[in-house]
Image (spheres, rainbow, N blue to C red):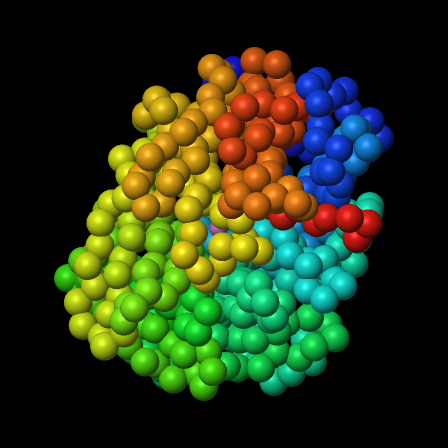
Amino acid sequence: MTDYRRGFESLRQELHEPALPVSGQLPDWLSGTLIRNGPAQFEVGDQDYNHWFDGHAMLHAFRVGEGAVAYRNRFVASKSRQEALEQGEIARSEFATDPCRSIFGRVMSLFTPAPTDNASINVARLDNAYVALTETPLPVRFDPETLETVGAVAFEDEVDVDTSTAHPHVEPDTGRLLSYAASFGRPSVYKILEGSSEERARTVMARLEVDRPRYMHSFGMTERYVVLSEWPLVVNPLDLLLRGEPFIENFEWQPERGTRFRVVRKRDGAEVATCHAEAAFGFHHVNAFERGEEVVCDVVTYPDASIIDDLYLDRLRSDAPTPGTGHLRRYRLPLAGGTATSTRQSDERLELPRIHEGRATGRPYQYVYGVGTQNVGDFTDQIVKLEVETGAAATWQEAGTYPGEPVFVPHPDGTDEDAGVLLSVVLDPTAEQSFLLVLDAASLEERARAPVPHAIPFGFHGQFFGGAGA
Ligand code: CO
């Protein structure tokens, strides 16, 4: 397979390469480890997982410093993976895959639900713990040096939730960690959680009861508020318990409900505004900030939720694939509530958006970086930088290669918001390998690249952990 579809084939090899070949010049100030997460095994025995989000999580670490790059990759030893390998078949319910169960097993599963701990979406550092995250509230701790799995984080609190975002926010000034979670039942409840680590118990900062919960992959945060964007992808919570379908297949697209934004004040957890907009769907909030009497909320959106269907593996491996990218949409949410207006900020396609987090989060900002699509039908074939106010775009592209999420790392002495580099893992199917690409974030010119001896399947999110920590 010499096109993008190589990125949806399994990688089983685990490697440690102390020194990758490096071409170009790594910035001398760049020191730390990029740790990325994504699925790497899409079948067990003769059973296939259904969806890109379902494959077994694998971590990839690129340690950069003193002009050299070391690489290591390792599967997350989740219970979901271990049970599947032991049994020779899919063992736990994933986002869009259910194990084959006997009738007895299905009945039993109502009483002993085993949500997946296949933490394939993101990574984070919670206090001193490095964790892999997915959308069940079961972060898996790992050793940042060896990538060995330590085990599930045992929360020491009474917080009871069924799902949790893989995109927590860190307040730039306080370091406080905020997360979105949901519990399904009567009533179902959205919860904003504060803190989550072995050392620190989580507390519920806000709770919003909801009759028909919506699927939300991420949320927005300004200096004073958090924003929940309720796309009209809706679930009857009883269906989650009773229908026995994979998680996401219980959700229904009900565009007549429109999109509802819930603006919640961090100080006291009060919902201060509820705003309505036309139906749309999005995975990723880019950023949000306060401006006068409104909250500006930037999201990568799609006209509807069919993007979730487009990311089933049979579709991705077909001859009619998805671009895999949406568009930057800016919502203006009046703090008095009511109708939210929105505009598409750019015609350039975008996904897996990243910003200068330490500086831009929750504040007015200039730039977003992400993957894009130049040739529709060629999946994500370029890196995009957008000026969020004007929509002006710059791109990096190399024919026949497929970049992943570009992680922005700021120059330690930088003054401009784009002073720094972007780190992206790029798939080169023809060469049967991937490479770490280092781009100057201001110019999108290549600074360096370091090829890995194997092709890395398309992943989701990663973080750069600076200094000696990893
Ligand atoms: Co995500």
Q: Position of residue 394 (x, y in %)?
A: 41, 29
- Residue drawn at x 75%, y 55% is 142
- Residue drawn at x 54%, y 23% is 445
Q: How many marks?
A: 0
Give the camera-side residue of 198 and 169: 169
Q: Is residue 62 shown left or right of residue 205?
A: right
Give the camera-side residue of 168 and 254: 168
| Looking at the image, residue 138 lies above or below residue 49 | below
* Res 293 quadrant in image: bottom left
| Looking at the image, residue 449 lies above or below residue 273 | above
- Residue drawn at x 76%, y 20% is 21
Give the camera-side residue of 70 and 243: 70
Q: Please indicate, yes or no, whether residue 17 appears anywhere in the rendered image.
A: no
Q: Position of residue 221 (x, y in %)?
A: 44, 65
Residue sitting at the far left: 256
Q: Please indicate, yes or no, whether residue 278 appears anywhere in the rendered image.
A: yes
Give the camera-side residue of 105 and 325: 325
